[in-house]
Amino acid sequence: MVNNNNLAEYETDITGEKLRESGTIEVLPAQPFKIMCAQTELDPTGFDTLRQRFSLICEITASNSRLLEITPKGVSKGTAAAHLAASLNLDASRCAAVGDGESDLSLLRWAGMALSVANAIPEVKALAKFTGPSAEEGGLADVFDWLIAEKTSRPPI
């Protein structure tokens, strides 16, 4: 992770997880569950080398244009949702998911109904049955309103 930047604080605020900054992986005290890589410059190709080198052995997704998340192969929002749904005896066809970024793609592909907001990346919007206004404009509330209206307009499953 790049030291001395606001990206670590931003991610900590979102996840509630305390991030440990490290110059190299060799100094970590244990095997990490997730590695986050941050770039200070807004460069869409900045993470290409990591993707090319490790995508066959790890899940690699961007949580935004400056943060890359690396997790063990098979660990994603989609697999987490599938495990949770299975524990609740829910089929994916009865589940909806909302997303806006690359890290949401596996979840949206898994869910029976994918939804998004206007500021979502094009790949997310392409999966969405409905896209609300941007998140900054209260789009998530509009997505939920649409979902409730959609659910109540159809007969129960």
Image: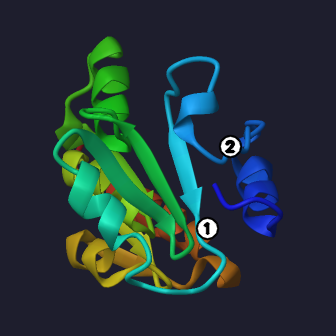
What residue sits 47% from the left and 51% below the top? 69
Q: Which of the two discs, 1 and 2, labels the residue nearer the N terminus?
A: 2
- Three-letter amino acid code at disc 2? Ser
130 relative to 42 in the view: left or right: left
Task: Name the residue nearer the viewer: 97 or 22.
Answer: 22
Q: Quadrant of residue 147?
A: bottom left
SS assignment at label 1: helix
Judging depth in this view, the residue of 146 and 113 nearest the camera is 113
Depth order, front residue of 136/64: 64
Q: Nearer the viewer, mark 1 or mark 2?
A: 2
Give the alpha-carbon distance from disc 1 to disc 2, as whole Å. 38 Å
Which x, y percent locates residue 152?
A: 37, 55
Which element type, helix, strand or loop, lies under badge 2? loop
Task: Locate the C terminus and report the quarter of the image it occupies.
Answer: top left
Answer left or right for 156 relative to 46.
left
Q: Is residue 95 above or below residue 118?
A: above
Which corner quadrant holds the N terminus? bottom right
According to the picture, the residue beneath numbered tag 2 turns out to be 22
Residue 96 lies, in percent from the top left, at 34, 50
Q: Residue at x 37, y 65 (%)?
A: 102
Q: How is the rendered protein coloured?
A: rainbow
Task: Give me the residue at 78% from left, 37% from top.
Answer: 18
Question: Does residue 71 appear to the left or right of 29 in the view shown?
Answer: left
Q: Is residue 148 above or below residue 93?
A: below
Which residue lies at the image location 27% right of the left edge and 25% below the top edge?
A: 90
Q: Position of residue 41 (x, y in %)?
A: 61, 84
Q: Nearer the viewer, residue 87 or 5?
A: 5
Residue 141's label in the rendered image is 1
How would you rate the neighbour count of disc 1 (Cα within 10 Å): few for under 14, some for 14-19, many for 20 or more?
some
Q: How many labels were placed on the picture?
A: 2
**Can residue 3 be seen?**
yes
Image coords of residue 111 (percent x, y): 25, 47
